[in-house]
Amino acid sequence: MFEWTQNIDWPSMLLSTGQTLYMTIISGIFTFVLGIVLGLVLFLTAKGGLYENKIVYQLIASFVNVFRSIPFIILIILLIPLTVLIIGTMIGASAALPSIIIGAAPFYARLVEIGLREVDKGVIEAAQAMGATRWQIVWKVLLPESLPSITSGMTVTLIALIGNTAMAGVVGAGGLGTIAYNDGFEANNNTITFIATIIILVIVFIIQYAGDIITRRVDKR
């Protein structure tokens, strides 16, 4: 029954799965932090924001728009010098992290900004009327009220990160993308490609399921 799986190097498949999870988790942490920072800056410095500043907003918005628009496979190539400077090599799971993070953080920042814009302005005005400082409004009003949207956006971003790790694998980052391309496509072994795809789908379904649960729990509306 399982003869079709006998030509699969399961230790390598397990190692590749671990590399994919490593790239997703580490890049997810940095994307989450940078995305929230960028999203907050965009929201707070926009017209009518608590820290309205046209120059800062335009600079951050331009950065976000540029790196959000570049196709990921091209971004990897463009950031090779930066990757070598930071990591010391352009090959391996760690070498893919700068490109994955820089590519995903601007995307998540826009989702954070959208989530913050959904906060009822009446709640912000009420906090101001009670004498809350701008930072108190950020930490005790904006972030808590937008937490469901921020969490939901992170779920979407993590799933996108899985796709980015697969593309990074094609250029030597390791992970399921590498084994699916090298051992599967180039070796004309469709079974390996199929198994790698199934594992990626399982990871995606787990992330989506966990993200939905967390979003429901933090949503107090």
Image (cartoon, rainbow, N blue to C red):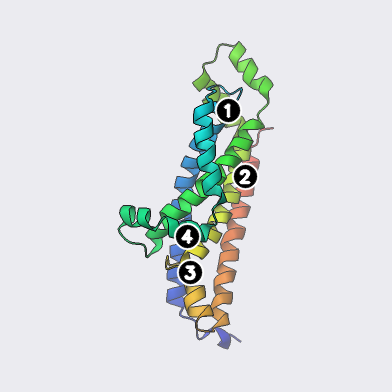
Mark identifier at residue 21: 4
Q: Residue 4: where, in percent of width, then height?
A: 57, 86
Quarter-of-image position of residue 200: bottom right
Mark identifier at residue 137: none
2 or 1: tag closer to the N-terminus: 1
Question: Which mark is nearer the camera, 4 or 3?
Answer: 3
Q: Which residue is mark 1?
A: 46
Q: Residue 71: where, in percent of width, then height?
A: 55, 57
Quarter of the image containing the N terminus?
Answer: bottom right
1 or 3: tag closer to the N-terminus: 1
Tell me which amino acid carries mark 2. Answer: Ser
Tell me which amino acid carries mark 1. Answer: Ala
- Image: 12 above or below 87: below
Q: Which residue is mark 2?
A: 152
Q: Residue 129: where, in percent of width, then height?
A: 61, 11
CB within 8 Å, label 2 to label 1: no
Quarter of the image containing the C terminus?
Answer: top right
Residue 178 visible in the snapshot: yes
Tell me which amino acid carries mark 4. Answer: Leu
Q: Residue 124: where, in percent of width, then height?
A: 62, 20
Q: Which residue is mark 3?
A: 170
CB within 8 Å, label 4 to label 1: no
